[in-house]
């Protein structure tokens, strides 16, 4: 990975959030329409509150016999890991590896602590060497 890259250099910007008070049905429709498997959850103030994945909806809602229309996205927010936009790309990668996550929100802490982007596996593939990609895969996938 290029040494001078920052999280903001490798992230995907213009990320859409599901509001914490929206239903999982709304979240699943957003995922379908955006062709994504995860969404950040934001409060009414626009600040990041969590992340929700399509797997969360299936395992923590549908498989439990709950109705997606009756469960709020914020109810499944879970543990949140993020990095500041000025964090080095290597530190962002390390965060993803340590916490075994495949998507990492990027926050602008100087600009009101707002979500500015997301680092995904596709972003890593564009910016990592083959050796770095292999190491990431072992640390994130093989450990699960």
Image (cartoon, rainbow, N blue to C red):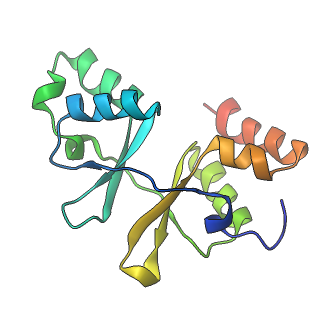
Residue name at image x 38 percent, y 75 percent: 113
The spot of residue 89 in percent (x, y) is: 70, 64
In the displayed orientation, state which residue is furthest to the left: 70
Residue nearest the viewer, comparing 128 with 141 = 128
> How many labels, in total?
0
Q: Place residue 66 in its image quadrant.
A: top left
In the picture, measured across the screen, residue 121 lies left or right of residue 76, that is: right
Residue name at image x 29 percent, y 28 percent: 29
The spot of residue 112 in percent (x, y) is: 35, 79
The spot of residue 56 in percent (x, y) is: 35, 31
The spot of residue 125 in percent (x, y) is: 75, 43
In the picture, measured across the screen, residue 137 lies left or right of residue 42, that is: right
Residue name at image x 83 percent, y 59 percent: 1
Q: On screen, 136 above or below 111?
A: above
Q: On screen, 38 above or below 80?
A: above
Residue name at image x 39 percent, y 43 percent: 39
Q: On screen, 46 above or below 40?
A: below
Instruction: Tell me the quadrant of the picture where the C terminus can be found.
Output: top right
């Amino acid at each position: 990975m290029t040494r001078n890259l920052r999280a903001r250099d490798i992230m995907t910007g213009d990320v859409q959030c599901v509001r914490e008070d929206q239903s999982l049905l709304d979240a699943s429709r957003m995922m379908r329409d955006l062709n994504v498997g995860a969404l950040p959850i934001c409060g009414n103030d626009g600040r990041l509150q969590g992340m929700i994945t399509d797997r969360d909806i299936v395992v923590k809602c549908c498989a439990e016999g709950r109705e997606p229309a009756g469960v709020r996205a914020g109810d499944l927010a879970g543990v949140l890991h993020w990095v500041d936009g000025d964090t080095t790309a290597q530190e962002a990668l390390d965060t993803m590896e340590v916490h075994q996550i495949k998507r990492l929100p990027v926050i602008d802490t100087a600009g009101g602590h707002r979500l500015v982007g997301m680092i995904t596996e596709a972003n890593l593939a564009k910016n990592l060497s083959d050796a770095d990609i292999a190491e990431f895969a072992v640390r994130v996938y093989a450990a699960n």
